Amino acid sequence: MKVRTKRRIGRALDKAGLAAAVAVLLAPCLFVFFWVLSLSLKYDIDNTAWPPVFWPEEPTLDNFVKVFDESPMFLYFWNSVQVTGSATLAALVLGVPAAYGIARARAHKMAAVLLLSRMTPGLSYLIPLFTLFQVLGLIGTVWPIALTHLVITLPIVVWIMIGFFETLPLELEEAARIDGATLWQSFCYVSLPLARPGIVVGAILSFISSWNNFIFGAVFAGRTTRTMPVAVYNMLTFESFAWGPLAAAAIVVMLPVIILTIIIQKEIVQGLSTGGVK
Amino acid sequence: MVVTTVKPAERHLRPYFRFIWPALIVSVLVIVFPWIFTLWMSLQDWRIGSARTFVGLDNYVGLLTNRRFLESIGHTIYFTILAVALPMILGTLSALVFHRKFHGRGFFRAIFIMPMMATPVAVSLIWTMMFHPQLGVLNYLLSLVGLPPSQWVYAPSTVIPSLILVEVWLWTPFVMIIVLGGLASLPSEPYEAAMIDGVSRWQMFWKITFPLVAPFLVVALIMRAIDALKVFETIWVISNGGPGTASEVLNIYLYAQAFSYNEIGTASAVVVVFFAIIVALSLVLLWARQKASWN
């Protein structure tokens, strides 16, 4: 009897400890996101009040309206969609077959080139590419930005897909080959459909990293070709005390990424942890 | 799972290379070409808009005596050590928590990894507002627990620790995810055996869990070290390398040389040095990883 109560108390303590640990871990993250939301829903009078106002008494969407009114946010959004979309698409078209080839031919030395590209600071690509694009007269369009984003998206796709193709059994492809399919056909009709979950994870992760990228856009973008992060950074330099609109802009940039993260959080965790160990 | 296929001859693998070529050509264009071009430019004295002359290793020699450059290396090392160590410790601890099974684990984990997914520029912007010495919410939180206000990123002595705080907030989830992957791959047999032998939980952690997870820790360490050395966006947005040059790390110095002063030659030499540091460090860590997995 005594032992059982002891065990029960122990289990309760264990549960309470776990709950406390989870709460402590989540608190910094929740607080920061709560704070930006709070700033974005208050008038600037409340945002610069001391002590700070935590709960907006009369929440307002004015800041969001302001962001879209005072800057061509839709244009920047469209720029970001173009850059991120084309960089992700190109990375998939090039990277998925490449990952398949690397996985099947065990050509890991080629994968090493891509790992090296992850190690190199993004800035180091910019000087040569900036010079090159200037010579080619491409500065001021979105295409240099999209092209440089391949530096980010291609390694991610290849990296994740190598791990994925390696787990696919060879037997199915071999069966297709025996039935007379060419290598290309067996890739298209057997491996590719099986790899779909991996492709989704690779696409979303490369979309997120490209969407979040600031530096390439900062160097290559002109007034009309700014991507979202560049546009938000420019707001900071020009109106450093309009905290409400700044917070609203920050939320607008992050929203697509946050939604994607929530949708595929399980796959992200899997994709990152298997991709990281190879 | 043991797959016993006959080891295919090179000849059989060759068709697969066709799948790789397109990506390889593009990689050479956007990744390898810049490397070679940078190496070549680092040997030139070249400001955008003026004539270019070949100067050999002068740019490198110049860097060795350039105080601002050497200081930026110091800042980078200071930043990197703390921005690696703290997320490693906290990330490992949080992985141990999230490895347990509890109600709503997936949901809480999704919230936990949100910082690393969020747009860094936006995150930096939020922290900039929180760091404000007069109106920032952080000083208010300090006052709640009876601590004196801090100057955060507005004083040379506190700027790097403050930036590290942001880095820890951003990247602890990354370490957590990788270590969590390691914990998930652990076999259950050693624990059952240890349980029968009456081994304590603490001993189990140090003698079984830790050695088995060590390779994952090394991977997390390598990635984190590379990313910390490359830090740019958070510092650029929050402190812009300041006050003065108090938080100017290598990457910020590089940006200033290349795009503020247009000193392409010097900037390229910085890139080469930078790259050498990163590759050397990665090799050391990879070597450490191999050693760890042999033991």
Image: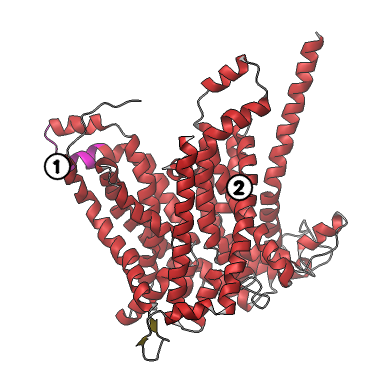
| A84 over A145 or under it: above or below | above
- Give the camera-side residue of A274 and A90: A274
| B118 over B47 or under it: above or below | above
Q: Residue placed farthest to the bottom in the image?
A: B50
Residue beneath disc 2: B88
Residue pictured at 62% horizontal, 32% vertical = B206
Residue beneath disc 1: B11
| Disc 1 from disc 2: Cα separation | 45 Å
In the rendered view, does B191 fall on the left or right side of B281? right
Q: Is residue B31 magenta?
A: no
Q: In the image, residue B2 lies at what x, y percent?
A: 33, 25
Q: In the image, residue B121 lies at what x, y percent?
A: 57, 64
| Residue kind at label 1, given as amino acid type | Arg
- The secondary structure that dominates the magenta segment is helix
Q: Which residues are magenta?
A: A179-190
Marks 1 and 2 on same chain: yes
